[in-house]
Amino acid sequence: SELHAAMGLAVLERLDEEFSHRAQLSETYREILRSDNSVSVHPLQNFMPSYTYFSLLFSCENGNTRRNRVHESLKKNGFGSRKYFNPLCSEVDCFANAKRANLDVAKWVVDRVLCLPLHKFIHPEDAATIAQIVLES
């Protein structure tokens, strides 16, 4: 839309700065969370990241419980996070009568994904605190 185009033009000159900031936050998260084998972070190989999201996959047996615990701990400490891809698109009312496929893997993943904040209002010190909350929750 024209509104989206105007917004894009307004922030275009700051795009490199925002991209660099998000890359720095992402590296802080990666460095600290590297020690937790129950959390998977998408590897940065063979592509140029957009740094739109920083998603975690809690791949441990109790991944859903842990993801929810981390989400609540972050909220309690004043940080937002997002249970991304939740609910699964096939679970939305408008698709209630749609033909369903076996979505066991998608259901498993959607219950275990959490996106950490990745924007200009999060400082590197905040990212370190956020990552520490993830480790301790």
Image (spheres, rainbow, N blue to C red):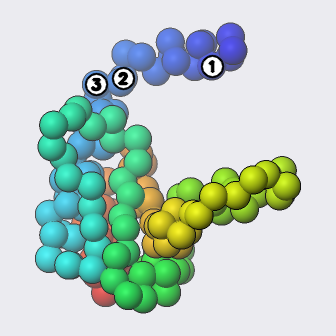
Does residue 109 show up? yes
Q: CA distance from mark 3 to mark 2?
A: 6 Å
Badge 2 or badge 1: first in the primary sequence: 1
Q: Residue flagged by tag 3: what amino acid is it?
A: Asp
Please tell me whether mark 2 sits on a helix, a strand or a loop: helix
**Left or right of 64 in this view: 128:** left
Q: What residue is disc 3 on? A: 16
Q: How many marks?
A: 3
Q: What residue is disc 2 on? A: 14
Does residue 21 show up? no
Q: CA distance from mark 1 to mark 3?
A: 19 Å
Residue 63 pos. (x, y %): 42, 81
Q: What residue is disc 1 on? A: 4
Q: Residue at x 34, y 83 (%)?
A: 60
Residue 100 pos. (x, y %): 70, 58
Q: Nearer the viewer, mark 2 or mark 1?
A: 1
Q: Residue flagged by tag 2: what amino acid is it?
A: Arg
Labelled pair 3, 2 in contact (Cβ < 8 Å)? yes
